[in-house]
């Protein structure tokens, strides 16, 4: 369908995160009537910023980086210049010690004692020899890891950390994941270089250049400022942004085309007709909400796609600064949170004078025991770890609160490729629907990719282009870490 010929076409965009609002901005700027719908009472999706008691908080550290210089200029213009450049500073904490991150080869000896290094080296060499003599197909994350780097290093660090973050045994994680976790690459890379400086790590999904981004951009008023501006521009061009409105159903007509959505807000249910739908909703939810329902094999495939959720604990502290880091990874299983970040190091507007804050990210699954925990419970569970890591103490804490996000990371289980392919193929049969964004394509994309997907989706509507280009965005394997 080409809506260029009919610019009265109603375009409904599901989700007011970066992808949805970027599409809305481009379309409304060209006079297309767009309606953006989001269930949250705020815009921005994962890239939102909360204000509370003079503090601002993001959903964990969000740094803007891209290889697309034109996009940075566009974002800077959008923010009227309120975009700062920062030099990244990050560490990881493991076994009661802090290490620079990304790890350098020479730091290996400070991570492990000499006996551990020797054991890991022996196991690494045995694995390398086995691979040469009897190369075996990698079945999952664990076998990929062990066959390249040995069981010792895997059992010491990667296995436990992977399980902590993903909540499933590494035997259930896809090999694809091994290529996508920078923390893992970093330590492996450093470890292997220690024993063989010249050797390059061979990775079947090799990234094209160094994945570590040492500089990044950050909006002075918080990452959510980008979406606030996208929303303001969309509305001033005549677009409509409806927040606090849940999309319950995707309606398909007799020809299998999208004819609208059913939404609900504060008990009111209504139908919103559409000539074209851009969806940034989780791809599994989108398939499962279609009416009439998709064939059973498709709903089963979509139902098998899983997202990991995150609980965020925000602490407000009577302390000028806790660290100089943007964030610190916490690899030990005994510590509940995976990562801690300090917003003050992103922007001085993060906290009132002489105060700072910490954000703790705790991995969980929707509906599990962490998902439903109160702020008090989480605080009590985390404060001792913060104290023993030498970061802060109870007397400094002036307040804390919690938020949660249900679809923070797509989980690459061993069978996800096939389930995703079936799901996408089914949706591509709906000619006036584009599914895109991090949730809509079930892919690890960063904020620049989300914006580019939004732009590409808008082009798709304007020019009636195929969605193919969307799948290429972010596929160069440059991940945040
Ligand atoms: C902890 C964390 C840290 C990150 N750090 C970085 C970083 O440093 N740099 C970087 O570039 N990227 C980072 N990212 C990734 C970045 O946040 C995302 O790529 C980007 O925000 C995705 O935007 P999106 O619009 O595609 O998805 P989302 O932001 O998830 O938007 C989807 C929207 O759909 C809405 N929705 C879902 N279901 C329904 C429904 N049924 N009805 C109505 N609305 C619905 C949601 O409320 C949401 O607003 C990070 C992500 C996380 C989780």
Image: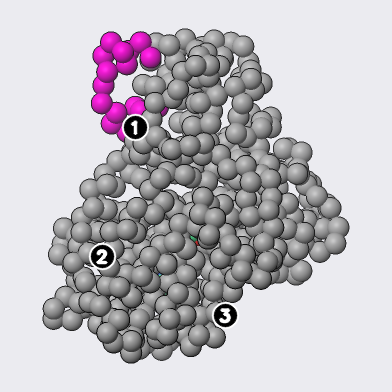
Name the residue tied to disc 3: 232
Magenta-colored segment: predominant secondary structure: helix
From mark 1 to mark 2, how far is it between C-alphas?
29 Å
- Disc 2, SS: loop
| Quarter where residue 335 is shown | top right
In the rendered image, the vertical position of residue 92 relative to residue 80, given as above or below: above
What's the residue at 40%, 45% (across, down)?
A: 476
Residue 288 lies, with reference to residue 388, above or below; the image says below
Q: Give the labeled residue for mark 2.
A: 466
Q: Residue at x 78, y 47 (%)?
A: 322
**Residue 368 x %, y %:** 45, 54
If you read the primary sequence from the N terminus, does the residue marked by circle 2 or circle 3 appear first?
3
Magenta-drawn segment: 128-145
Dot 3 crowding, Cα within 10 Å, few <14, some 14–19, many 20+:
some
Which mark, residue 270?
none
Q: Is residue 73 above or below residue 33?
A: above
N-terminal of the two: label 1 or label 2?
1
Which residue position is annotated with label 1? Answer: 204
Picture quadrant of residue 298: bottom left
């Amino acid at each position: 369908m080409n809506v260029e010929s009919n610019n009265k076409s109603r375009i409904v965009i599901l989700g007011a995160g970066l992808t949805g609002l970027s599409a809305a901005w481009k379309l409304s700027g060209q006079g297309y009537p767009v309606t953006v719908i989001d269930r949250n009472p705020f815009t921005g999706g994962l890239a939102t910023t909360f204000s509370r008691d003079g503090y601002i908080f993001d959903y964990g550290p969000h740094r803007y980086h891209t290889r697309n210089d034109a996009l940075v200029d566009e974002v800077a213009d959008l923010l009227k210049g309120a975009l700062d450049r920062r030099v990244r500073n990050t560490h990881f904490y493991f076994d009661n010690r802090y290490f620079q991150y990304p790890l350098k080869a020479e730091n290996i000896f400070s991570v492990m004692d000499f006996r551990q290094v020797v054991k890991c080296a022996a196991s690494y060499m045995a694995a390398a020899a086995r691979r040469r003599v009897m190369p075996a197909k990698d079945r999952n994350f664990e076998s990929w890891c062990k066959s390249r780097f040995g069981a010792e290093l895997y059992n010491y660090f990667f296995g436990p950390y992977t399980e902590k973050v993903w909540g499933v045994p590494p035997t259930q994680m896809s090999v694809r994941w091994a290529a996508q976790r920078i923390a893992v690459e970093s330590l492996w890379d450093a470890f292997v270089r220690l024993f063989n400086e010249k050797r390059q790590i061979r990775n079947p999904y090799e990234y094209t250049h160094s994945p570590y981004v040492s500089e990044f951009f950050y909006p002075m008023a918080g990452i959510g400022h980008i979406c606030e501006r996208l929303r303001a521009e969309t509305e001033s061009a005549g677009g409509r942004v409806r927040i606090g409105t849940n999309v319950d159903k995707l309606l398909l007509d007799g020809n299998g085309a999208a004819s609208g959505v059913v939404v609900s807000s504060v008990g009111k249910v209504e139908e919103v007709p559409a000539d074209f739908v851009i969806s940034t909703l989780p791809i599994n939810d989108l398939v499962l909400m279609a009416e009439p329902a998709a064939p059973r094999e498709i709903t089963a495939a979509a139902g098998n796609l899983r997202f990991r959720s995150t609980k965020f604990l925000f602490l407000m502290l009577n302390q000028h600064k806790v660290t100089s880091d943007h964030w610190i990874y916490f690899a030990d299983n005994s510590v509940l949170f995976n990562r801690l970040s300090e917003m003050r190091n992103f922007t001085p507007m993060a906290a009132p004078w002489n105060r700072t804050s910490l954000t703790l990210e705790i991995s969980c699954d929707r509906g599990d025991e962490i998902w439903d925990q109160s702020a008090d419970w989480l605080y009590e569970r985390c404060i001792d770890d913060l104290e023993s890591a030498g970061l802060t103490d109870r007397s400094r804490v002036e307040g804390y609160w919690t938020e949660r996000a249900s679809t923070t990371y797509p989980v690459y289980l061993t069978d996800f490729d096939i389930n995703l392919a079936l799901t996408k193929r089914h949706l591509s049969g709906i000619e006036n629907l584009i599914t895109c964004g991090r949730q809509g394509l079930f892919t690890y994309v960063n904020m620049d990719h989300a914006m580019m997907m939004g732009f590409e989706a808008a082009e798709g509507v304007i020019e009636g282009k195929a969605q193919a280009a969307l799948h290429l965005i972010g596929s160069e394997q440059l991940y945040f870490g």
